Image: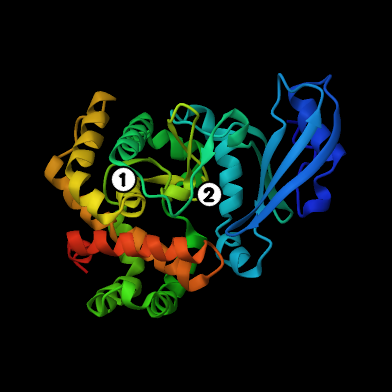
Amino acid sequence: MNSKQNILVHGPSDLSVPWAQRIVSHHAADARVSDVQLQSVDVGTTTRFRVVVEHDAPDRLPTRWFVKVPSTTLKSRVVTGLPRFMHKEVRFYRDVSHSVPVKLAPSLAAQSRFGRGATLVLSDVTEFGGVPGNPSDALSFRQASQVVEHLAQFHAQFWNKPALVHRHRWLSGSVSAEDVLGTVMAVPLMKRGLSLAGDLVPAGFHAPALRYARRRREVMRRLALGPKTLVHHDCHPGNLFWTSQGQPGLLDWQLVRMGEGMGDVAYFLATSLEPECRRAHEEALLDLYLCALERHGVAELDEVQARLRYRAHLAYPFEAMLLTLAIGGLMDLDSNLGLIRRATAAVTDHDAFGALAI
């Protein structure tokens, strides 16, 4: 799309026929838009609009669109705006997504302008028979196996590729604004999250959790010591979708960066499986991930060390879900509490704070 064409959306009134026409014309110059109907609005870490765009080229372009813009709520804008998460997702779809070997929602338009906002327009996954995930979903072993296979293929594609960061410095694992905000707010948010979580987090966990928060910058450095690849960094079940053939895809790439692939696996298993299912199949899923990495050309991993890194990385989804609760309004409350329960069980089972040696 011509970078001079403005497709930025700030509110529902911007979802007009001329706006949609600019996007449609980029893909099909002869196609004409006749109407745009707003179907739903969802506000969280971002604001999401679902729209139906009536045009005369449905054989070439989807008619159901999913539009993401920075959150319209003040709290979410503070949390996600300073680190420019939405701008990062736009750049991911614009510059990197074509190389990602996992299923994505097709991008129709992506634009980011400093100080003026960011907008991402995707085909709604329902357009091709897909089913979006929900944060409260509890995956089966079969579903988890499919996701782990996809993560291994994704990580192998970008394994040890320093040139990727050289070309796209925004993918650096050290995101300064996010680092500073996380360090400054870690302790008060952890205290609030632990208070709100109540009995979901045993009292004995409070001291190590607060120690983790006080030393968060050091912890983040330790969690970045493993082999580097491109990571999603937010692999909970609400950021998945499932195709009509039952294959998984990944949504919400706001936190994408270079990091350790095992972090994605730990986040996924800690949040997407009920504790009983995770305990029964965890070793098999970790073996599956390591074997799939080797099958895709990554053979230098030490299995013992990989499992130690898995244990350490379980602390991050625990923190992320508690901070989501502390901030409020970023996720459905019942789903958030359910993910805290799952993550707490994973941290308990593996003494994740002990593995971090903090």
Q: Is residue 322 left or right of residue 203?
A: right
Q: Is residue 118 left or right of residue 200?
A: right
The answer to whether residue 306 shows anywhere in this view is no
The percent position of residue 182, horizontal first and vertical second, equals 45, 67
The percent position of residue 140, horizontal first and vertical second, equals 32, 42
Q: Quadrant of the C terminus?
A: bottom left
Position of 47 relative to 304 (above/below):
below
Q: Earlier in the sequence, mark 2 or mark 1?
A: 2
Kindly report the distance in space between the C-alpha atoms of the residues bearing marks 2 and 1: 18 Å
Q: Is residue 254 left or right of residue 148?
A: right
Position of 162 relative to 199 (above/below):
above
The percent position of residue 15, horizontal first and vertical second, equals 80, 45
The answer to whether residue 49 shows anywhere in this view is yes
Q: What amino acid is at disc 2?
A: Gln
Q: Quadrant of the N terminus?
A: top right
Residue corresponding to mark 1: 265
Q: What amino acid is at disc 1?
A: Val
The residue closer to the viewer here, 180 or 318, is 318
> Residue at the spot x=18%, y=47% of the render?
280
Would you call the spot at circle 1 few (<14 residues within 10 Å), some (14-19), or many (20 or more)? many
Secondary element under disc 1, as helix, strand or loop, is helix
The percent position of residue 350, horizontal first and vertical second, equals 18, 59
The number of numbered badges drawn on the structure is 2
Residue corresponding to mark 2: 254
Secondary element under disc 2, as helix, strand or loop, is loop
Would you call the spot at circle 2 few (<14 residues within 10 Å), some (14-19), or many (20 or more)? many
